């Protein structure tokens, strides 16, 4: 049992380190007679390692019967805007390309994720959202950058 728990913990640890999103709002884009409508959802999440940063992600969610049952595959398009919402302290152990948010966008094979980079030369945090699949990802992506500035209230 200890081996199984260790193996399961290793699989779940990356999920625990990723931020979880809070839904801010949504709009319907396609009416469906059966099941939920197709929609665009706006979510917010805080960077789990960099205090003072909140990211806003907008993305499509497929409705209908498959969407209502969690079987539909959502589109790869997404938009992201990250903002400084408080004093920013960049930890020394920050890794470029580190995942800060990840969500399943199909039953098994597709995810949308946000990764962070630190541009030391410009003292700027850069966030990239993209979608990938087990076999083939999508080149569609969006990027946002936050120059680290003194915080004044």
Image: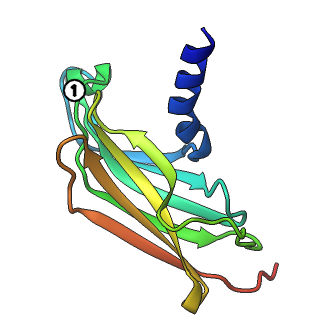
Image height of 119 relative to 2, above or below: below
Q: Which of 93 and 148 is in front in this view?
A: 93
The residue carrying mark 1 is: 64
Q: Residue 42: x percent and y percent?
A: 45, 51
Left-right relation of 56 to 134: right
Total label count?
1
User: Could you tell me which residue is drawn at 77 percent across and 81 percent down?
Assistant: 151
Q: Residue 40: x percent and y percent?
A: 33, 48
Q: How is the image coloured?
A: rainbow
Q: Which of 153 and 1 is in front in this view?
A: 1
Image height of 101 relative to 116, above or below: above
User: Could you tell me which residue is drawn at 57 percent across and 43 percent down?
Assistant: 20
User: Which quadrant, please, contains the C terminus?
Assistant: bottom right
User: Could you tell me which residue is drawn at 36 percent across and 48 percent down?
Assistant: 112
Query: Most extreme residue toward the bottom, as rendered?
Result: 121
Q: Residue 47: x percent and y percent?
A: 62, 58
Name which quarter of the figure residue 107 lies in: top left
Q: Residue 13: x percent and y percent?
A: 58, 36
User: Could you tell me which residue is drawn at 55 percent across and 53 percent down?
Assistant: 44
Determine the secondary structure under disc 1: helix
């Amino acid at each position: 049992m200890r081996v199984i728990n260790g193996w399961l913990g290793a699989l779940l640890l990356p999920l625990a380190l990723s931020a979880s999103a809070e839904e801010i709002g949504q709009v319907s884009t396609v009416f469906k007679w059966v099941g939920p409508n197709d929609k665009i959802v706006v979510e917010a999440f805080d960077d789990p390692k960099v205090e003072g940063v909140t990211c806003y992600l907008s993305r499509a969610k497929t409705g209908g019967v498959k969407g209502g049952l969690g079987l539909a595959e959502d589109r790869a398009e997404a938009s992201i805007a990250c903002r400084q919402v408080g004093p920013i302290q960049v930890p020394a152990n920050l890794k470029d390309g580190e995942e800060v948010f990840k969500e399943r966008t199909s039953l098994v094979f597709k995810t949308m994720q946000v990764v962070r980079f630190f541009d030391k030369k410009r003292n700027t945090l850069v966030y990239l959202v993209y979608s990938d699949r087990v076999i083939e990802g999508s080149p569609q992506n969006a990027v946002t950058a936050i120059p680290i500035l003194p915080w004044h209230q």
